[in-house]
Amino acid sequence: MTTRYSAPFGILLCLLAVASLGAQEPAAVAGTVTDSSGGVLPGATIEALRGLRVVSTATTGNDGRYQLDLPTDGSYRVTARLDGFAAGATDVTAGGGATADFRLDIAPLSDTVVVTASRTAEGSASVMESHSVFTEDDIETLGSHSVADVLRYVPGLNIESTGREGSLTSVFARGGESDYNHVLIDGVRVNANGGYYDFGRVSASEIERVEVVRGAQSALYGSDAIGSVIQIFTKRGTPDSGPRLAGSMEGGSFGTARGDLRVLGGAQQRVDYQLGVAYRGSDGAFQDRLTELDRFDQQTIDGNVGAILGDTTRLRTGFRYSNARANSVGPITYAPGDTGTGADTDDLTWHLDFDQTLSSRIDHSATVSYFRSGRQFVDDGSDPQYRVFAILEGMPGALYPAGPRLVRLLDQATFDTLAADPTGLGSGQFLAQNGPYNGFDWASDFDTQLRRPAARYQLNATWLDNQVLSAGYDYYSETNALDELQTVANHSYFVQQQFNVADAWFVTAGTRIDDNAHYGRSMNPKLSAGGYPLPFREGPLSSLKVSANIGRGIKNPNFSQLFGSQWVDGDLSLLPEEAVTVDAGAELTFDDQRWRASFTWFNNDYENQIAYSPSPGFAGDGLPDYVNIDGSRADGVEFEFGLQRPIGGLTASASYALVDTEVVTNVSTSEQFQPGQPLLRRPRHSGNLRVGYTRGRGSLNLNLRITGDRHDNSFMGLQRLSDGRGVDISVNPGYTLLTAGGQFRVHRALTLFLRIDNLTNTLYDSALGYPGLPRAVVAGGRFDIGG
């Protein structure tokens, strides 16, 4: 009997259950959306969320009213948003005619979500740290071909490269060293061991968004976060979009070709995905000076997929692999190009992210990630020695800017003529030359292989409605794959409290304890505070925001400094480099927020900086070749001013930074590194101006970038002819570059563009000896099909 009737009985139960569910009446929530004066707001978007998933959407009518139809009774999070107003949110229990009315206050026009500053999502208006955000639209308007080009428009950041596209590119944030930037791609730290990162090898076509937070951030991120945290987000799909095929193709001067192709989309409001490939290559711009191509080629593949499980759990995984091949031609302003070289990189990142909402007040997340990096530099050492003959002016050994600078290079015949009769030299000028010299050209093969597995956990608890307490744990291990005895493990524990007073005043206090296998324990606190003496409103003066920050940053030694190499002896007792950074500023908006202006003052003190101090026997004598010293300092100001809303299709913005740096202590005998000298390759003055005009389906833009004189070193081993005194070029003249571009949308799915870099064909050295690119023209198109 049991066997005979069990199947029909089960089917009957299922049918009854389905009928019961079908008989349930959908629940509803209704309400009105108004502004702060009580006026109704038509066109506002209302969404109901169950956990992480949007289950219903509605739009307010002309009377400001809406109704959300919900699948069942129960608890929901209902949000309201409208451009120009701060978003509203409330928890609602649906059923029995539930209502939810919203009053939306005026919001900052430029408000956007920022996640890097606090490791939690927050509106830009409530972030008190100095920060900049670039969206995909911003990057397209700038015409950037790499992340380095994007960062050139961040005030206080100086970007220096050593040649054509794909060349070694460094970022100096607020006068700090080039290894003082903590760099993340989709949440994965991608710095080399010791902190350096080459910003020339991330193509702009991969990027959906870039966030930059300036100042020490080691309270959340640990090592390398002294000058800035730079987070790059690659492109991803959206759960409410169908499949799309998107990409771009462009080509132009110097054999330049770039392109990308990606498939992205989503399904069922639960899944999003993206898979893309990108390529860029160039022959370089100086073939008239070189005997072989200065070729660069890079291929990248990246992908990610995210899914919402149930209503409260989200998983995401992604990867990025980049392979780049290039030459390294050296300082060709002064010398023949280096031949027989290679500068190749292979990078792989992978991450798996878990986020879960445990209740309306508690959520947590966990991430495991892996970074693998390979760098190889080869030189066959076959180049002949060369001579450099020059006229210099300035005072050898003097503090910048009175030190030597190049007047012009000479051939040997002209040099010999002036040596015999120096009356042809101008006032204060002198002759300099080097002996037979081959720079750094010798047979070599440098290979580095880094492996970095990592894990992170973070818990966020909200109390008293909008006070957020976060705590978490970070772990990573760094290993030199060529010598697995060179391994450093780090365990970190952090806590952070975000205070919010009436959505007008904000304080964030936090600290992190790093427990390192070699350096022991260190504590790195941070405090950010600020708010709005004048909240956002309509009127000639629309808002006033004030802020201040203080934090401690660290940077750990690299493997060579700790363990040594064939060239140096390491020192396991070295301490991490440290900095205390302080900044304070104000931001104002005018004319109903049409205009925005900001001012920030900063001061950075660097201590325990690691300096090279060779022992008498160099490598192999057992005496360390590195020491900790007091270091250097930097201070300055940053200004920004611009339109937040177009005027007749016109947009404009400008920024300026004054960065004053100084060596405090050093053990080097080089005149360029003596106390009182400014730090190398940090201009005291820099700025930019961006102007755009849009009409219909077309737009034009002009970008002007100004870089002032800066202290540098040619490293040419020059000697003054009159007395044989060692002297090198130490002043790099400033320059101004103008870029023009335009784009036209010929179809919903196709936009054509044209860009001219260095429109005036300005001659300059980005770093002494490394000429910047001359005028270059690139044309192409972007397409986006489907969705």
Image (tube, rainbow, N blue to C red):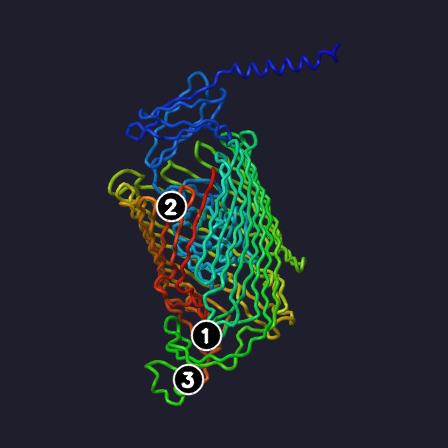
- Report whether residue 480 is seen: yes
Give the Cα separation between the discs numbered 2 and 3.
57 Å
Q: State which mark lies toward you, 1 or 2.
A: 2
Residue 118, position as x, y percentages in the image:
47, 44
| Label 2 packing within 10 angstroms: few (<14), some (14-19), many (20+) | some
Residue 394, position as x, y percentages in the image:
37, 77
2 and 3 marks in contact (CB < 8 Å): no
Is 440 situated above or below 525?
Answer: below
Residue where numbered disc 3 is placed: 415
Side of 371 where 216 appears, left or right: left
Give the Cα separation between the discs numbered 3 and 1.
15 Å
Is 227 situated above or below 20?
Answer: below
Mark 3 or mark 1: name the one nearer the start of the chain: 1
Name of the residue lying farthest toward the bottom: 420
Q: Quadrant of residue 773?
A: bottom left
Q: Which mark is residue 216?
A: none
Mark 2 or mark 3: name the one nearer the start of the chain: 3
- Report whether residue 130 is seen: no
Task: Name the residue rendered at 41%, 44% in the picture.
Answer: 127
Residue type beneath disc 1? Tyr
Q: Say what secondary structure mark 1 lies in.
A: loop
Q: State which mark lies toward you, 2 or 3.
A: 2
Residue 343, position as x, y percentages in the image:
56, 63
Residue where numbered disc 2 is placed: 745
Residue where numbered disc 1 is placed: 334
Picture quarter with the N terminus: top right
Q: Say what secondary structure mark 3 lies in.
A: helix
Q: Nearer the viewer, residue 699 or 21?
A: 699
Name of the residue lying farthest toward the top: 1
Mark 1 or mark 2: name the one nearer the start of the chain: 1
